[in-house]
Image (tube, helix red, strand yellow):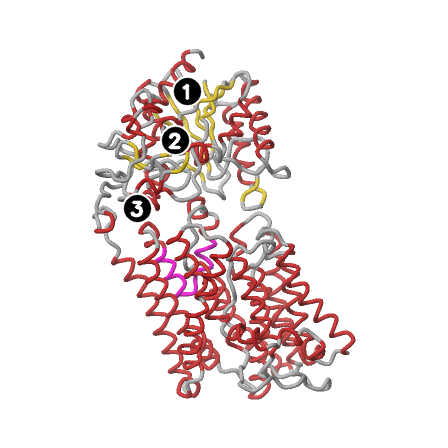
Amino acid sequence: MAIANELWTQARVVAAPPPPPAPASRPVSPRSFRGDIEGLRAVAVLLVLLGHAGVPHLPAGFVGVDVFFVISGFLITGLLLEELDQRGRLSLAAFYARRAKRLLPAAATVLVATLVLTYFFLPRGRWSTTAWDVVASACYAMNWRMAGQSVDYVAANSAPSIAQHFWSLAVEEQFYLVWPLLLLALGWFARRRGRGHRGLYLLGLALIAIPSFAWALYVSPTDPSAYYVTTTRMWELALGGAVAVTAARSSRSPRLVAVPLAWAGLLAVGASAVLIGSTAGFPGYAALGPTLGTAAVIAFGPAAGRAGPALLLGRQPLRYVGGISYSLYLWHWPVLIAAQAQFGDLGVGAALAVVAVSAIPAALTYHLVENPVRRSPTLTDQPAVALRVGAVCTGAAALAGLAFQLAIPSADSPTPASSVIMGQVPGASTQAAPPSAPGAAALGSSPRTSRAGLPVDRVDSITPNPVTAARDAPSLLATKSCHVSLESSTPEVCVYGKKDAATTIALVGDSHADQWVPAMRGVAETNGWRIATYTKSGCPFLTAEITQNDRPYTSCTEWNRKVREGLLGGSRPDLLIVTNAEYPVRGEPGRSAMAREMRKTWSGMVAEKIPVVVLRDTPLHLKDVAECVSKNPNRLTKCANPREEVLGRGGGPAQEEAADGLAGVRLVDLNDWICPADRCAPVIGGVLVWRDAHHLTATYSATLAGPLGTALKPVVAGL
């Protein structure tokens, strides 16, 4: 979730109380201070902050984003129109200078502070990603980076970025690049044709809003990146611009009409925050509530006067929060993420306390950075100087991110904080190279009674390095990856073992199937079998359609159809091995629905004379185990979670239910070699078991070839 930027700084804040509403016959100037807009800013930022703190019954605090986009479009367009009306021309240099001095110094300050917080509080495994996030944020491209990560399965399941809230600032800056230029062109055309300007300005806004809204309606139901991209968000800013263009008319509305409409608008914003359940569908139809509501408050507020929402929004506490809301938004998220990294999951009360604490640096930034720069006579009178100051701020923040990236110690070099962590991620190959450490082999044939599986605080060495363990995945280590991304529906097949083997085994499923590829390859080479792998991110082998990020996962449905056709056609295996995490079935979420659909799918394969082995899903932790190990190299027991809890989560229970009593289907459970003790040791036999919260490292998977082969031999022998 994020917030627009300009809105925090556009309204002209004065020390005197707000003037009374303008007479009905005269429109309100965009430069007139509007206490209700200042208060509306406060409502928007508080919605986002409370949503981030996890306050109950506020599932859609993120609608504060939409509120701010509309406010920003209104204020910016109003100022541009006023300049055109008064001077007959528009100075782009002056416009961008105002944006630079009002936004960039505070943003740069927080980005540099974010790197400091990262160094002291975030696990080293996040440092590199954060450095690039800071660079993207400084260059106002964070929304596109977030869009790319939203369809990247690994990134989408990673910890949230400490700088992700900068995405909305990027959307606005990109709007500012387009709208003033279009406004200039329309003004020039109007003068040439001798036509009225306002109608053409509305036409220009329509040229932005209609395609943008149509695109949002088309992509938002199925594409999570739609939440971040500029093309789906422009209509919200354009809506605010349309309110500015028509302000003269709306400010003269009859009070009997304006008062209920303005209050209804504020109610629509609040109701949206409470009633909307997720970001699915945003920013499409679901975004109409907060955006149209905001537009109504702004458009009819002047005519409603003190009988309208200004009665509430114009109060001094809300106006002060609205005044510092830009800095408050910039600061609250990095402080919250740093606190979570330091103390773990925060309850609502603790999260609210952290958000409240973030108001301190926010207020300091507002009074010591924002206001002095914004009110500087030199920067006001000399746009070129203001632009240079903005460029320096942007460059400094971007260079700080690059310098942080370059200064990160090599993951293979021990540091004083993690001197016991050695080893490195294996180089590119089709499987993880067998480690010198034994891994699962240290457990012997009786893992549940082996002392090698007990959690300990300290080990001599760990491989792979926990800092870079996220890269210890089969699909990332492979020279040619056959693991299909979230958006693709085309199966990719990798074949291991003996090409002309008498026995062919197919491994099919999601990334929880892909994690078994190193072990499967070892089994194939040892036993002379041929193994073909078909895996896709977030996609279990099912005939039913599942959802991903509350959206229909259509590419998974199509991928499954194609894989099934291949398995029943020319690529028919002698044995099918499946496994997966737990997913919501579209239209009927819940574990029982998942179990029923798996049972239906497996029965269909058995009916086609293809026996099925189900690898029970691996443990699901609530926290990234590799990050925990990197932070606690001398207290590894802090990363050991109860076996009963982690095995009770994920796809395992539904798989057990689905396989129970099903002819032709055998359940194979190797979790005794993954979590042999009552608490799951993060390191076994010198090998890091998990690369995140629920995926095995490729290195540890390779050490499971022995137990897996032992479990499969009797099945293959009976074919």
Q: Which residues are magenta?
A: 130-147
Q: Are marks 3 and 2 in contact (CB under 8 Å)?
A: no
In the depicted view, which residue is nearer to us: 658 or 313?
313
The residue that mark 3 highlights is 632
| Residue 496 percent location from the top left of the image | 35, 26
The residue that mark 1 highlights is 504
Q: Secondary structure at mark 2?
A: loop
Q: Quadrant of the C terminus?
A: top left
* Occupied quadrant, residue 543: top right
Q: Secondary structure at mark 1?
A: strand
Q: Is residue 647 above or below residue 53?
A: above
Nearer mark to the viewer, of 3 and 2? 2
Q: Amino acid at mark 3?
A: Asn
The residue that mark 2 highlights is 678
Cα–Cα gap, marks 3 and 1:
43 Å
* Occupied quadrant, residue 670: top left
Cα–Cα gap, marks 3 and 2:
20 Å
Q: Amino acid at mark 2?
A: Asp
